[in-house]
Amino acid sequence: MPARASRRSSISRDRISRASRSSSTKIATASASTKQPEERVVTDTLVANSSERIERARAALAEKPDGVVEAIAAKADVTPAEILSILPEGAAVVVPADQFLPIWDDMSSWGDILMIVHTEDIVLEVEGALPSGSEGHGWFNIHGDSPIGGHIRKERCTQIAFVDRGFHGRRSCSVWFMNADGRAMFKVFVRRDAEKALLSDQLARFEALRSKLANA
């Protein structure tokens, strides 16, 4: 991967783990000479909590490196985004949320894909083509001749990750639309053929789009 891509090849922990790192980073940069004893205690506690989260995340991932990201995150008591951030280099390539529409438009020409919505209560899987969307009344509205339809709070998307990793022993490629809570709003997966191999045409489109945006 080109040098520019590598710099963007993993999700920044400062962006995806605001609750655990943003505050500690800002406090830690203040001059030690100006801190009161109470401030030092707060800083030390936040840094320790951040380190503990990373350690828990890494331990959980090591136990099941090709497992379900949400399950790994739940075991470590961290967010899915924090798990993505510690995947091997290149396994989670992040691009800005302002690429939502170009990405959606490109994927709408991939043919039938697999869309997954994963919450604590349901894992919803739908196969179909992504319809073209339009914005109105604060929603990104998708309608068309496809089982996939509805309304998306597009402004809730803070970043988009191209995830390319092993999943239960097989390569899995997907596009995750992430929110500020560090969770996937929804994911679009490259589909598989009858032999469980990734569809070559969709895989090529996934890789081309990832490369294009990573090098933009």
Image (cartoon, rainbow, N blue to C red):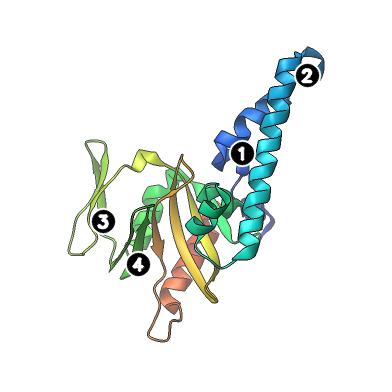
Kindly identify which numbered label has been placed on residue 132: 3
Q: Type of residue at label 1?
A: Asp
| Residue at the image position 26 percent from the left and 36 percent from the top | 138
Name the one closer to the observer, 161 or 184.
184
Q: Type of residue at label 2?
A: Ser
Q: Type of residue at label 4?
A: Leu
Q: Is residue 177 left or right of residue 9?
A: left
Which SS class for mark 4? Answer: strand
Q: Which residue is mark 2?
A: 31
* Residue density around tag 4, few if under 14, some if 14–19, many if 20 or more, within 10 Å: some
Which SS class for mark 2? Answer: loop
Label 3 or label 1, whichever comes before in sequence order: 1
Which SS class for mark 1? Answer: helix
Q: Are marks 4 and 3 in contact (CB under 8 Å)?
A: no
Label 3 or label 2, whichever comes before in sequence order: 2
Q: Is residue 150 left or right of residue 64?
A: left
Q: Which residue is mark 4?
A: 114
Up-down: is 65 above or below 169?
Answer: above
Q: Type of residue at label 3?
A: Ser
Label 1 – label 4 distance at C-alpha: 30 Å
Q: Are marks 1 and 4 in contact (CB under 8 Å)?
A: no
Which SS class for mark 3? Answer: loop
Residue most extreme to the front = 75
Q: Which residue is mark 1?
A: 14
- Quarter where residue 108 is shown: bottom left
Label 4 or label 2, whichever comes before in sequence order: 2
Up-down: is 114 above or below 29?
Answer: below
Closest to the camera, between mark 3 and mark 1, is: 1
Label 1 or label 2, whichever comes before in sequence order: 1
Label 3 – label 2 distance at C-alpha: 52 Å
Q: Is residue 86 left or right of residue 169?
A: right
| Residue at the image position 69 percent from the left and 56 percent from the top | 3
